[in-house]
Image: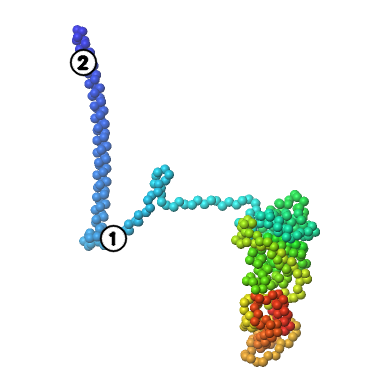
């Protein structure tokens, strides 16, 4: 009985092991079935893809040259698209992934403007360049030699660097400024200080406002108004003591040019007739903010007191004609057809205003009609040309003064004065 019990126990253990092995085999078979099903599905997908490719190939061959289209006729060969040129190898990004070869769009920073005043040369469009070097500022003010009782005129004070320096030495400073932002800025510089009562700011254009009384002018002016500013200054009455002005370098050299020099021109003659002009110092473009494209020079202008007793309109009319072709002889200039026509009109007007009878000339051609549009002062419907008479007067004047072969580029102010006086004696007028 003991052996039978032991045998029974042994059979129970063997049955439990066989049952565990059967469960494992069943799980393995299930896994194999699932894998086989997946493989079959993958093969089916491959067959479907190959079938689609076969259909596309047949359709392409049907359209190829030599194949028959509708009605049994061979179809026209189709043009194959050009092969794309091989491009540069694809770049890789920092992370190792291929990056696009397309150019990246540039980011634009938003435009921002600082609050408060801004240099006009940088954004205002008024052509201002602010002097930032304090040594140059002190040098300009020192050259003016200001006195405690003098009134100073300044054009374009900007941020007030030079203005404050002059307020410390002069009785009063009158500043003319076109930019409203700079008007506020220069007033802020002296607000709440003893210098505030000595400053007067005029908001306006220098060429349009009436100039106040002043003794000295000190300014760093906008270069585009150099010429009209200079002649408005020289025409101002009462006369001032001097002006210390910063100009563009070439313009300053023209102001001080002498006869025979390359830059000698009408500006040189007219300015030196009315004033003594001297160059004081040269200022590099890096002394400004924003820097201009050219260097600058500081010039002192001292009006001649008393001024020369001449009619400036007459003078300027003659000088203008001479310097239109400054290297031609004066005889060639004044006997040209255009100049004779101009002088003939001036001659007739002057004789009519002064009551001087016109000279009698011989009949040398057809009568020239006056183009006065029916002016009652014409007196007659036509008059004979006075061009030959004027040409004779001009040749006599040039021969008398000895300037028939002279050129304007070589004549000085005294020569032009002598020539104008000789022309006016014969009633040859230029205005």
* Mark 2: secondary structure: helix
Name the mark on residue 421. none
Q: From the image, tell me which residue sits under label 1.
A: 78
Classify residue 287 as left or right of residue 2. Answer: right
- Residue drawn 22% across the image and 18% down it: 15
Q: Position of residue 48 (x, y in %)?
A: 26, 45
Front-most of 255 and 45?
Answer: 255
Quarter of the rendering containing residue 124: bottom right
Residue 296 visible somewhere in the drawing: yes
Determine the residue positioned at 34% across, 56% down. 84
Residue furthest top as drawn: 1
Q: Label 2 belongs to which residue?
A: 11
| Residue at 72% over, 74% down | 312
- In three-dimensional space, the C-alpha distance between marks 1 and 2, rounded to whole angstroms, equals 84 Å
Tally of numbered discs: 2
Mark before the other along the chain sequence, 1 or 2 = 2
Q: Residue furthest front?
A: 260
Does residue 420 appear in the picture of this structure?
Answer: no
Q: x, y percentage for residue 40?
A: 24, 38
Instruction: Give the camera-side residue of 199 and 70.
Output: 199
Residue 253 locus on image (x, y percent): 65, 67
Picture quarter with the N terminus: top left
The residue located at (22%, 21%) in the rendering is 18
* Disc 1 residue crowd, few under 14, some 14–19, many 20+, Cα 10 Å: few
Q: At which x and y percent is residue 292?
A: 61, 60
Q: In the displayed structure, would residue 373 be above or below residue 65?
A: below
Question: Is 366 or 416 nearer to us in this picture?
Answer: 416
Q: Secondary structure at mark 1?
A: loop
Q: Is 62 situated left or right of 344 in this image?
A: left
The answer to which image quadrant residue 26 occupies is: top left
């Amino acid at each position: 009985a003991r052996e039978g019990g032991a045998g029974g126990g042994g059979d129970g253990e063997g049955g439990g092991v066989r049952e565990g092995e059967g469960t494992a085999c069943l799980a393995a078979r299930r896994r194999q079935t699932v894998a086989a099903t997946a493989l079959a599905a993958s093969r089916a997908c491959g067959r479907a893809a190959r079938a689609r490719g076969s259909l596309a190939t047949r359709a392409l061959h049907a359209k190829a040259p030599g194949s028959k289209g509708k009605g049994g006729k061979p179809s026209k060969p189709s043009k194959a698209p050009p092969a794309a040129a091989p491009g540069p190898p694809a770049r890789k990004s920092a992370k190792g992934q291929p990056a696009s070869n397309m150019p990246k769009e540039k980011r634009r920073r938003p435009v921002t403007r600082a609050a408060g005043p801004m240099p006009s040369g940088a954004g205002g469009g008024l052509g201002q360049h602010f002097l930032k070097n304090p040594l140059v500022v002190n040098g300009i003010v020192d050259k003016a030699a200001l006195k405690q009782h003098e009134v100073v005129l300044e054009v374009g004070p900007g941020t007030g660097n030079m203005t404050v320096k002059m307020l410390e030495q002069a009785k009063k400073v009158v500043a003319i400024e076109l930019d409203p932002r700079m008007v506020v800025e220069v007033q802020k510089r002296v607000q709440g200080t003893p210098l505030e009562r000595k400053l007067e700011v005029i908001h306006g254009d220098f060429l349009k406002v009436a100039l106040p009384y002043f003794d000295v002018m000190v300014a760093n002016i906008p270069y585009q108004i150099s010429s009209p500013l200079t002649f408005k200054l020289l025409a101002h009455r009462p006369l001032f003591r001097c002006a210390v002005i910063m100009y563009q370098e070439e313009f300053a050299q023209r102001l001080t040019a002498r006869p025979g020099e390359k830059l000698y021109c009408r500006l040189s003659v007219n300015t030196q007739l009315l004033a003594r002009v001297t160059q004081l110092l040269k200022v590099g473009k890096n002394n400004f903010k924003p820097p201009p494209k050219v260097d600058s020079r500081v010039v002192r202008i001292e009006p001649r007191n008393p001024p020369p007793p001449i009619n400036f309109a007459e003078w300027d009319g003659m000088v203008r004609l001479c310097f239109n072709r400054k290297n031609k002889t004066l005889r060639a200039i004044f006997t040209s057809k255009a100049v004779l026509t101009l002088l003939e009109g001036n001659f007739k007007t002057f004789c009519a205003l002064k009551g001087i009878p016109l000279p009698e000339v011989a009949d040398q051609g057809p009568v020239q009609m006056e183009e006065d549009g029916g002016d009652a002062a014409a007196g007659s419907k036509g008059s004979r040309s006075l061009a030959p008479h004027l040409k004779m007067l001009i040749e006599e004047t040039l021969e008398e003064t000895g300037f028939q072969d002279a050129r304007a580029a070589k004549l000085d102010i005294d020569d032009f004065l002598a020539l104008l006086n000789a022309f006016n004696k014969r009633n040859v007028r230029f205005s």
